[in-house]
């Protein structure tokens, strides 16, 4: 193996790099085929309204039913998808499928509370020139009410050209769709974009929720984010709530919504619907 020569260390060829390239190339081909063969699946994680302890909505999360490797989570294929231009195709499949699923579920449960649907958009997808047109098309094809659709973006989306991004955000909101900033606090977190860009909700990253009972600085951070959302007329969703103590702490801070394994893992649609039945109780009629 070549020794790292001076500052060129990162450019030195290592056999593992070639193996990784081959592995990623194969994964990319399989992923392209997966889209055609309909191997992607959706699971839905309930989002709980803390004032009522009812399910207020679902977040759609993508999975890949791989023919040999079994059910894969997004961390195993979204990075390759992003590099190969497939992220947009996956997000669009997810949006259409989730709108169809939810329209269908709601039609079959006419007494149930109308649920919101949250769908994740990658930066690559959000910044594509025809994203708003595509959203409009899916909403009209599926009949899903735009008022109940949330698009989740991460802070990375907001790093590009401010004029173009601002325009896309406003165009999405003009459809009636809401914008949720995912994993809030983990990215480049410049408070200026809360001021400059139209957003509806901050999703407090689960790393802060995970440490809020042990760490004073984490709990102060969560408190600050929650009170900031109130002052700015935004909503807050706490991610990754895993126990009753965290839920109680978030309730005490006045956090509006929560999501996490304590309430429910992400589940296939029918099982997620059962959680709605269990928690929203009598309203199911
Ligand atoms: P995210 O959007 O922040 O989604 C929340 C992730 O946290 C999900 O992981 C969920 O299963 C997990 N989670 C929920 N509650 C808990 C909890 O109490 N404890 C812990 N430890 N984890 C919890 P998942 O499904 O593996 O998704 C990971 C990420 O992949 C998502 O993070 C999102 O950024 C991305 N992703 C998933 N589906 C899509 C998609 O359709 N399009 C795009 N662009 N990204 C997606
Ligand atoms: Mg999300
Ligand atoms: Mg999230
Ligand atoms: Mg997260």
Image: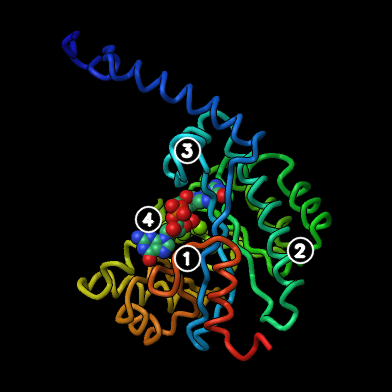
Whole-number angstrom distance, CA of label 2 to CA of label 4: 31 Å
Q: Nearer the viewer, residue 202 or 160?
A: 202
Badge 4: residue crowd in 10 Å (few <14, some 14–19, many ≥20) = some
Whether ligand 4 has any atom under 8 Å from the Cβ at mark 4 is answered as yes
Badge 3: residue crowd in 10 Å (few <14, some 14–19, many ≥20) = some
Foreground mark, 1 or 3, reads 3
Position above or below: 196 against 51: above
Q: Tell me the quarter of the picture where residue 249 sits.
A: bottom left
Position above or below: 82 against 119: above
Q: Identify the residue position indicated by label 2 in the image.
A: 144
**Residue at screen point 44% across, 80% down:** 255
Q: Identify the residue position indicated by label 4 in the image.
A: 186
Task: Answer with mark 1 or mark 3, whichever residue precedes in sequence.
Answer: 3
Q: Secondary structure at mark 1?
A: strand
Whole-number angstrom distance, CA of label 1 to CA of label 4: 11 Å
- With 124 as the anchor, is 176 left or right in this view? right
In contact (CB < 8 Å): disc 1 and disc 3: no
> Colour mode?
rainbow
Badge 2: residue crowd in 10 Å (few <14, some 14–19, many ≥20) = many
Q: Nearer the viewer, residue 197 or 276?
A: 276
Task: Answer with mark 3 or mark 4, whichever residue precedes in sequence.
Answer: 3
Whole-number angstrom distance, CA of label 2 to CA of label 3: 28 Å
Position above or below: 100 against 80: below
Badge 1: residue crowd in 10 Å (few <14, some 14–19, many ≥20) = many
The image's mark for residue 13 is none
Task: Answer with mark 2 or mark 1, whichever residue precedes in sequence.
Answer: 2
Whole-number angstrom distance, CA of label 1 to CA of label 3: 23 Å
Q: Identify the residue position indicated by label 3 in the image.
A: 77
Q: Identify the residue position indicated by label 1 in the image.
A: 203
**Residue at screen point 21% across, 71% down:** 215
């Amino acid at each position: 193996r070549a020794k790292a020569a001076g500052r060129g260390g990162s450019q030195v060829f290592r056999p593992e790099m070639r193996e990784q390239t081959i592995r990623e190339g194969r994964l990319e081909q399989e992923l392209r085929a997966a889209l055609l063969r309909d191997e992607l699946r959706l699971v839905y994680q309930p989002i709980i309204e803390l004032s009522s302890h009812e399910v207020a909505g679902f977040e759609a999360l993508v999975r890949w039913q791989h023919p040999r490797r079994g059910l894969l989570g997004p961390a195993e294929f979204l990075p390759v998808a992003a590099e190969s231009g497939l992220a947009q195709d996956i997000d669009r499949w997810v949006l259409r499928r989730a709108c169809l699923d939810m329209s269908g579920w709601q039609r079959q449960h006419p007494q149930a509370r109308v649920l919101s649907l949250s769908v994740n958009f990658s930066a690559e997808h959000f910044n594509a020139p025809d994203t708003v047109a595509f959203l409009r098309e899916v909403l009209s094809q599926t009949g899903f009410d735009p008022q109940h659709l949330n698009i989740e973006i991460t802070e990375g989306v907001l790093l590009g050209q401010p004029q173009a991004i601002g325009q896309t955000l406003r165009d999405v909101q003009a459809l009636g769709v809401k914008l949720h900033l995912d994993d809030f606090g983990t990215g480049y977190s410049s408070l200026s974009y809360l001021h400059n860009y139209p957003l509806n909700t901050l999703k407090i990253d689960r790393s802060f929720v995970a440490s809020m009972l042990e760490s004073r600085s984490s709990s102060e951070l969560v408190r600050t984010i929650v009170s900031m959302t109130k002052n700015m007329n935004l909503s807050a969703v706490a991610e990754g709530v895993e126990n009753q103590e965290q839920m109680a702490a978030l309730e005490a801070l006045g956090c509006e919504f929560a999501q996490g394994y304590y309430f429910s893992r992400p589940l296939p649609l029918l099982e997620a619907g059962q959680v709605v039945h269990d928690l929203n109780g009598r309203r199911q009629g």
